Image: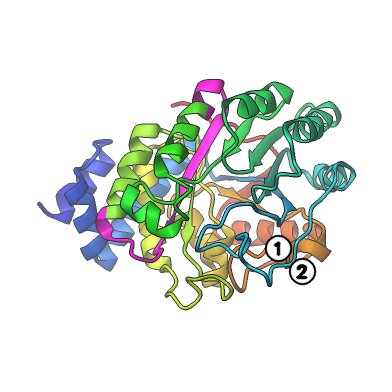
Amino acid sequence: MDNFNTIKKLKNGTVPEKQELALLLRTITSEQTEDLRHAAQEKAQSVFGNKVYIRGLIEISSYCKKDCLYCGLRRSNKNAVRYRLDKAQILSCCETGYRLGFRTFVLQGGEDPYYTDDIMCGIVSEIRRHYPDCAITLSLGERGYESFKRLYEAGADRYLLRHETANAEHYSRLHPKSMTLRTRIESLYTLKEIGFQTGAGFMVGSPWQTYENLAEDLLFISELKPQMCGIGPFIPHKDTPFGNKPAGTLETTLVLLSVIRLLHPPVLLPSTTALGTIHPKGRELGILHGANVVMPNLSPAEHRKDYSLYDNKICTGEEAAECIRCLSLRMKNIGYEIVTDRGDFKQT
């Protein structure tokens, strides 16, 4: 068992064994990383060309009923600044985004009980009415079959629900006892069954994570075949129980992006804000390692710093127009172009 054969399998579209993937992640050299990067970039370009899709992120609420140990929005964080956007504010963000060329809106928030099915379906249907040519993505946590179905029927196209780790024991160390990996996995399969373009994903370098855990994440992505996959380095938040834990690394995150691209070539794979937070060129490096999506922030500028999942998050003060101009230039400098397109999943 060696990395050469594992990388060869990935290039050939074969899924390696768990121990092969764990060994690759543990021992990969800089030359092997570059070989993997080149293969992933080629694979991404064979599916998407040099196009990078933009998603307009609207962070609708910093309230959350859950108490995940890593998250700055957790219910027990008494220092968190709480806010929520109403329908008019959300539609105003969409209007700004549409004018700037966004054709996907991502409504993301904590699990805020204020957004009942009636309220949320009303917001989704209003966005659909005003912007029929746009995709609507939701990232609002676990809601149950009937709720997911109503949101889909109201006009939502996509749903992001990161599984965070595919190992049940590891999951239990990151979350309160009331949350289980089984519920999270069942939710993901339910979303796919209903018809959503479904996104999973995981943190890289979260406390107690092993290379075997990461290999399990990769195999889960290979099995689930989500239309989207969001991964990013764990970044500690000072007001959580993990505030003094070390962050995940850029290097491992980039290798994982490349492996995911080779395991599941058509996946929509973001180069995340977290990557840009731990390295000044993190988002560019993510694209060069096989990612093809970036998500500028359309949230009202006065609330961006309050949506504090982790410390030192970038772009909390920029206007949306400024952010998109900056990103366009950054992508152009590495040979890519940001495109005005819904950027739907296309099965190859």
The residue at the far bottom in this view is 244
Q: Does 124 sit left or right of 1 as displayed?
A: right
Give amino acid for label 2. Answer: Gly
Of the numbered discs 1 and 2, the one sitting upstream in the chain is 2
| Residue at image location 56% in from the left, 22% down from the top | 195
| Residue at image location 42% in from the left, 67% down from the top | 248
Residue 28 in view, yes or no: no
Measured in 3D between alpha carbons, the distance from the residue under mark 1 to the one under mark 2, in whole angstroms, is: 13 Å
Q: Does 139 sit left or right of 193 as displayed?
A: right
Secondary structure at badge 1 equals helix
What is the basis of the colouring in this image?
Answer: rainbow
| Residue at image location 74% in from the left, 67% down from the top | 81
Query: x, y (%) of residue 28?
Result: 24, 63
The residue at the far front in this view is 177
| Residue at image location 32% in from the left, 52% down from the top | 169
Query: x, y (%) of residue 309?
Result: 61, 63
Q: Which residue is mark 1?
A: 326
Q: Which residue is mark 2?
A: 317
Residue 150's place in the image compared with 79, above or below, is above
